[in-house]
Image (cartoon, rainbow, N blue to C red):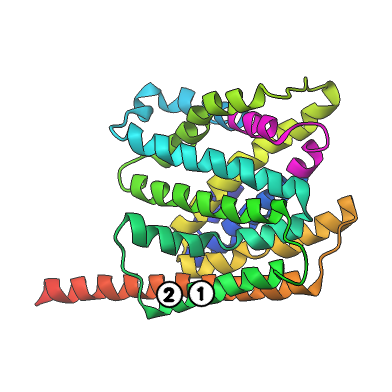
Amino acid sequence: MNSYAKLGHLPGSVRGVLWMMLSSLFYALIYVVVRGLAESFAVNQIVFFRAVLGSAFMLPWLFTAGLGALYTRRIPTYLWRMLFSYVGAVAWMYGIAGMPIADANALMFTMPLFTVILAAIWLAERPGIHRISATIVGFAGALIILRPGMIEISMAALATLFAAAMFSGALIGSKMLTATENPNAMVFYLYTLMIPPAAIGAMFGWTNPGLSDIPLLIALGVCTVGAQQCQTRAFRAAPASLVVIVNYVQLPLIALFGWLIFAQSTDLWTWAGAAVICTSTYYVSYREGRNARMSADNKCDGGKS
């Protein structure tokens, strides 16, 4: 019995935690790889590399599944999801290149909070007082990290918050697509559709990659696809309220990598703000999971009566 088959026999909660731990490691490595590539390439060019490599790493699946696996009637949703993801990726990598990577990661934890706001606007969801309160507290955590009035707020920090908002828009698109679309097709479409706009951005200030850049570029592709695939399997195997806690492992991992590789330090304000953000996002996730279970129980009770 191979290791993947053994994993399938574990309880769903255990599998979800293991998948999310692996996803967190991949995401932590992405921060390191992007920071390393930013020393040689412009941000737009790194986004282009990521799109090309992400698409290329999905080709083995496409060859196996066939072109029929790409059939969809939802190209408009795929397109605006890609647009939000592309703009978010540019802003995110600008933030990684311009500030300590642990600080950038801490600010990216605001993404679920932006999702609450955008879902209320686009999907007409009505967040209750609990989600509204948790969202306000979460953004207060971001202010603890930024400390406006105490220190100068950098463009990199603002870009990272903007990236979190853009990725939230892409996440809503993903949620809309998961009801009908193949998860592998969603990943393939995301990066393949991103190639043309990323190529246009990359043309300005293009730098030819050398042989010494190949290991980092391959690592970028592997970590990009690996992080998404592992995260998808984590949320399938276990409740979001459980696996989202494991996702916060990213911060100490990235802080450790930043210290060991780039000699970056993270102050107490970042950890305090991250703790506030993580607590609020976990509370939102916990409430959503509990409401979903209550709704399912009510439907079951209604079916029996």
Q: Which residues are magenta?
A: 33-51
User: Which residue occupies the foreground of this view, 151 or 236?
Assistant: 151
Q: Is residue 115 above or below residue 33?
A: below
Count of numbered circles in the view: 2
Q: Residue 67 vs residue 187: left or right?
A: left
Q: Position of residue 142 (x, y in %)?
A: 63, 68
Q: Is residue 255 above or below residue 302?
A: above
| Residue under the point 41% across and 38% down | 80
Q: Give the CA distance from mark 2 to mark 1.
A: 6 Å
Identify the amino acid type marked 2.
Ile
Q: Is 50 a magenta residue?
A: yes
User: Which residue occupies the foreground of this view, 284 or 45?
Assistant: 45
Density class for disc 2 (Cα within 10 Å; few <14, some 14-19, many ≥20) is some
Q: Position of residue 66 (x, y in %)?
A: 40, 23
User: Which residue occupies the foreground of this view, 97 or 253?
Assistant: 97
Q: Is residue 1 visible?
A: no
Q: Is 64 a magenta residue?
A: no
Density class for disc 1 (Cα within 10 Å; few <14, some 14-19, many ≥20) is few
Q: Position of residue 13 (x, y in %)?
A: 50, 66
Q: State yes or no: discs 2 and 1 in contact (Cβ < 8 Å).
A: yes
Q: Is residue 170 visible?
A: yes
In the picture as drawn, the residue positioned furthest to the left comes out as 305
Q: Which residue is tagged 2?
A: 132
Q: Position of residue 240 (x, y in %)?
A: 47, 65
Q: Which residue is tagged 1?
A: 136
Give the main secondary structure of the magenta stretch: helix
| Residue under the point 41% across and 47% down | 174
Identify the amino acid type marked 1.
Ile
Residue 11: which numbered mark, if any? none
| Residue under the point 35% across and 71% down | 127
Residue 299 occupies quadrant: bottom left
Q: Secondary structure at mark 1?
A: helix
